[in-house]
């Protein structure tokens, strides 16, 4: 089958040729994917879409009629649509902030074990960053071993989660004006866990029933994610595994190999994926693979854990969120190894139709149909080896007749941590600031987030990026958007050809792509750090910068927390899918207009990537005019 022969239905689902090929294959073989399940779900619940259903107590469930005349306008307790929508929204923020921050806590735990000499194979790779972070925390570094420093740092960071009074140290990286604003509004977070717990308390029946007060708590918890839990995850991952530097790799399903053991690592935390990468290089494992007739062991990534090892080791990435099922349908995957977040429970049943083993590893995340091999940092390398061995031994059960791997794999250049960007600029931000001031670069676009079958796969991401770079907007990206960009060839220095003249000149002079891969979802914290550095260099707040954010295909609760901390940091953000808030005029107005007067930024919702680009560019131009540049 070729693209010309695909049905209209298939063509409407993705713009990625590899995904289209596998979707056609899935249809031919009768396998169901997320797109089919969405179709079966239609029409989706209108109350849910508007955010006006509540089951926070057992007098409910209650739902508010959105129609003028008929139907109830309050729940059994008297809660209005505004109250219900605000409560539901901030519970989404709590879910997202909890996910990111628990990830950060796990990394802090790994650092602690490593410092105590109990980390089963981990070591401190970036001593310079360790010392810089220690200095931020006021920890003595002179004449001390890296383990001693790391122990103090891990304990100090660990304490951030359970702190009662604040401040969370990394929030002080934000420009002074921003911190002062947070303090004035009473949203400067006190402790990471505390803010999440307080959301759950306030949204219990009969507690906080003021929509604005509820949203302010959502803002406080989201800041504790972006400038707290997520930033901790990023910074300590760099200490343990190394701060990313530019490296070349490949992206898309074509990175799977027909004659090797294919291991797909999917999920989020680098503690697992780093060790799998190491164990797959173990000569004993390679010899075992050869004994089973494979030419080697091919480890590839998926979603954000894939981004982590892509950025640090150049491990190829097989795809983004909506490609997880498609990878299994290639019939060439011996094991899909998962930890936490964004892993579809559908993978278990689907893997059962192939020889593929779905291997769950986290005590927090078990899946139907999975083989559970629990991962503990104390024995990390040994467990990783056991997992790799399980994958290798599965190679003999591969059914050659089922194997179908698309050819697509695109070259990419990744690894743009803030440190790497500064290095590419020659050691200071000045060339970037000059390019912004001269107008060669009009502004910065932070484009991030998931896939969502409600939007044609990768269409929202890729078209938005193309449009922005054409208009001289330099892009920083993470998560599944970054993977879409890599697959589309936008992460090569040659992609500068597609950029406007100004951006093209800057990229060519520096040898960088116009779309810079800054990492996984938690690494949006790197974007915050970059924004703070630029704002500080210009002597302004982040909300004054010619910068705009977007999440064209977002779907997860983490994305709700991210969007909220991004606007709370002062960056206007365009969402490609509609959040469940339209049932409340008060919340909708606050998020799309009122917040401007409070935190200096708002959300807009625009599914059309061309119109979204226009909104972002207009915003950037407005900010340039206000700065007088
Ligand atoms: Fe209904 Fe109020 Fe209970 Fe929600 S909290 S389910 S609106 S009675
Ligand atoms: S993996 S949160 S689908 S970006 Fe981080 Fe992708 Fe969104 Fe998950």
Image (cartoon, rainbow, N blue to C red):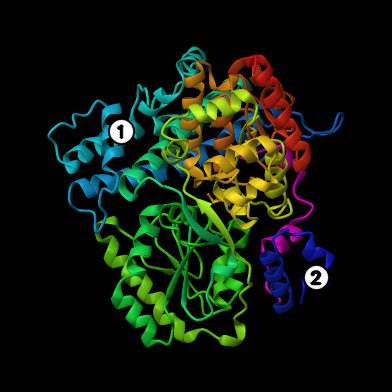
Could you tell me if the residues under marks 1 and 2 are in contact, i.e. CB atoms within 8 Å? no
Residue for point 60% across, 23% down: 437
Which sits in the foreground, 158 or 133? 133
Q: Answer left or right for 154 relative to 594.
A: left
In this view, the residue in front, 321 or 277, is 277
Q: Is residue 91 left or right of residue 499?
A: left
**Mark 2 Cα-neighbour bin, 10 Å: few <14, some 14–19, many ≥20:** some
Q: Position of residue 48 (x, y in %)?
A: 71, 42
Q: Residue at x 41, y 47 (%)?
A: 244
- Helix, strand, or loop for circle 2? loop
Image quadrant where one finds the C terminus: top right
Compared with 120, 169 (above or below) is above
Q: Is residue 212 above or below residue 263?
A: above
Residue 24 picture quarter: bottom right
Residue 319: give its label: none
Residue 170 visible to the viewer: yes
Magenta includes 465?
no
Residue 518: x and y in percent read 50, 44
| Disc 1: CA contacts within 10 A as few (<14), some (14-19) or many (>=20) | some
In the rendered image, residue 35 lying in the magenta stretch gets the answer yes
Q: Could you give the CA–CA distance between mark 1 and mark 2, rounded to whole angstroms?
A: 53 Å
> In what quadrant of the picture does the N terminus appear?
bottom right
Which residue in the rendered view is the most extreme toward the left?
143
Q: Earlier in the sequence, mark 1 or mark 2?
A: 2
- Out of 45 and 456, give the one closest to the viewer: 456
Residue corresponding to mark 2: 6
Q: Which residue is mark 1?
A: 133
Magenta region: which residues?
Answer: 30-58
């Amino acid at each position: 089958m070729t693209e010309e022969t695909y049905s209209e239905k298939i063509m409407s689902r993705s713009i990625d040729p590899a995904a289209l090929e596998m979707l056609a294959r899935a249809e031919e073989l009768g396998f169901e994917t997320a797109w089919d399940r969405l179709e079966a779900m239609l029409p989706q619940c209108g109350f849910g879409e508007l955010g006006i259903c509540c089951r926070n107590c057992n007098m409910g469930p209650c739902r508010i009629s959105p129609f003028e005349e008929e139907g109830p306008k309050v729940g059994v307790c008297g809660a209005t649509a505004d109250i219900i929508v605000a409560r539901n929204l901030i519970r989404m923020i709590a879910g997202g902030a909890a996910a990111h921050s628990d990830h950060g806590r796990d990394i802090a735990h790994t650092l602690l074990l490593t410092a105590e000499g109990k980390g089963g194979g981990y070591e401190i790779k970036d001593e310079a960053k360790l010392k810089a972070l220690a200095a931020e925390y006021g920890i003595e570094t002179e004449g001390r071993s890296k383990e001693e420093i790391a122990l103090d740092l891990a304990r100090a960071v660990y304490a951030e989660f359970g702190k009662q009074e604040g401040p969370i140290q990394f929030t002080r990286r934000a420009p002074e004006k921003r911190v002062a604003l947070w303090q004035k509004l009473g949203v400067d977070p006190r402790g990471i866990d505390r803010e999440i717990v307080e959301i759950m308390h306030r949204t219990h029946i009969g507690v906080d029933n003021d929509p604005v007060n509820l949203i302010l708590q959502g803002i406080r918890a989201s800041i504790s994610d972006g400038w707290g839990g997520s930033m901790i995850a990023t910074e300590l991952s760099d200490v343990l595994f190394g701060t990313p530097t530019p490296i070349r790799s490949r992206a898309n399903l074509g990175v799977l190999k027909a004659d090797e053991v294919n291991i797909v690592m999917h999920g989020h935390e680098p503690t697992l994926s780093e060790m799998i990468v190491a164990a797959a290089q173990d000569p004993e494992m390679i010899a075992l693979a050869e004994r089973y007739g494979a030419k080697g062991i091919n480890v590839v990534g998926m979603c954000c854990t894939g981004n982590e090892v892509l950025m640090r080791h150049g491990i190829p990435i097989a795809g983004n969120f909506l490609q997880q099922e498609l990878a299994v349908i290639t019939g060439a995957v011996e094991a899909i190894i998962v930890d936490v977040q964004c892993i579809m429970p559908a993978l278990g049943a689907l893997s059962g139709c192939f020889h593929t083993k779905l291997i769950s590893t986290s005590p927090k995340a078990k899946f139907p149909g999975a083989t559970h091999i629990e991962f503990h940092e104390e024995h990390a390398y040994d467990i990783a080896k056991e997992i790799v061995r399980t994958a290798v031994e599965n190679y003999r059960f591969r059914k050659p007749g089922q194997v179908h791997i698309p050819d697509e794999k695109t070259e990419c250049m990744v690894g743009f941590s803030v440190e790497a960007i500064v290095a590419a600029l020659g050691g200071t931000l000045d060339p970037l600031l000059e390019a912004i001031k001269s107008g060669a670069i009009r502004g910065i676009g932070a484009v991030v987030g998931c896939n969502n079958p409600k939007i044609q796969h990768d269409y929202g991401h890729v078209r938005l990026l193309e449009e922005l770079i054409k208009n001289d907007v330099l892009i920083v990206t993470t998560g599944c958007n970054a993977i879409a960009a890599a697959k589309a060839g936008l992460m090569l220095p040659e992609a500068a050809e597609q950029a406007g003249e100004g951006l093209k000149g800057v990229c060519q002079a520096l040898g960088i792509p116009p779309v810079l891969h800054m990492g996984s979802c938690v690494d949006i914290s790197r974007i915050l750090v970059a924004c703070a550095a630029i704002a500080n260099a210009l002597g302004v707040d982040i909300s004054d910068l010619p910068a705009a954010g977007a999440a064209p295909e977002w779907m997860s609760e983490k994305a709700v927390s991210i969007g909220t901390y991004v606007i709370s940091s002062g960056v206007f953000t365009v969402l490609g899918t509609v959040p469940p808030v339209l049932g409340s005029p008060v919340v909708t107005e606050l998020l799309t207009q009122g917040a401007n007067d409070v935190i200096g930024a708002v959300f807009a919702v625009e599914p059309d990537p061309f119109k979204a680009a226009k909104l972002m560019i207009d915003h950037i131009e407005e900010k340039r005019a206000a700065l007088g540049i």
